[in-house]
Amino acid sequence: MELRAGARAELSVVVEESDTAVSLGSGDVRVLATPRLLALAEEATVQAIALDESQTSVGTRVELTHVAASPVGMRVAVAAELVEVDGARLVFDFTAADARGVVVGSGRVERVVVDRGRFLARLPRPERG
């Protein structure tokens, strides 16, 4: 499947208690946690591309700026756009904004397209016991 710059996806969530810094252990206030913002950005990048069943993409690099707090109950939309395709390497820019239109965060996510079967076959086996 050929991927081209310009592919986009947007998702929207209402911040819940489980999304907060308190819940995720990344802080002690009830606002959207930075790790949750990153997860939403990565989810948007995955939604922006359609891969063959035999393929998946894995995150390899992230740049994230989180500039505004979003309390529980606030809607946050995250938009990602594929801005560069370099072989299997995909580069996305993303922006997150709250329901007031205030930019909450932005950044860049890099992913690499891999063969799903080969990737899974190379995973180390966890030790038991």
Image (spheres, helix red, strand yellow):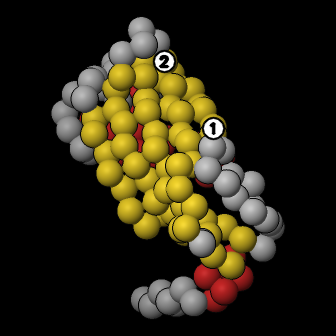
Q: How far across and down, in percent of the image, does residue 124 sit?
A: 50, 89
Quadrant holding the C terminus: bottom left
Q: Quadrant of the N terminus?
A: bottom right
Callout 1 amino acid: Ala
Task: Tell me whether circle 1 and circle 2 mark residues in contact (CB < 8 Å).
Answer: no
Image: 41 above or below 127? above
Dot 2 corresponds to which residue? 75
Relative placement, left or right, of 17 versus 33 is right
CA–CA distance in space, label 1 to label 2: 17 Å
Q: Amino acid at mark 2?
A: Arg
Q: Residue furthest top?
A: 100
Numbered label attached to residue 112: none
- Residue 110 relative to residue 9: left or right: left
Q: Is residue 36 left or right of residue 6?
A: left
Horizontal relation, residue 62 to residue 94: left or right: left
Residue 69 placement (x, y as % from top left)? 28, 23
Residue found at x 53% / y 49%? 83
- Kindly tell me whether residue 21 is visible in this rendering: no
Q: Crowding at label 2, few (<14), some or many (≥20) Cα neighbours within 10 Å? A: some
Q: Residue at x 27, y 24 (%)?
A: 68
Q: Nearer the viewer, residue 115 or 3?
A: 3
* Foreground tag (1 vs 2): 1
Q: Quadrant of residue 101?
A: top left
Task: Identify the residue at image location x=56%, y=42%.
Answer: 81
Image x and y of residue 23, in percent:
33, 38
- Looking at the rendered structure, the secondary structure element under dot 1 is strand
- Residue picked out by circle 1: 9
Q: Residue at x 68, y 79 (%)?
A: 115
Query: Does the rendering let one see residue 26?
Result: yes
Taking 4 as reference, is 28 above or below it? Answer: above
Tag 2 secondary structure: strand
Are there few (<14), some (14-19), or many (20+) residues within 10 Å of tag 1?
some
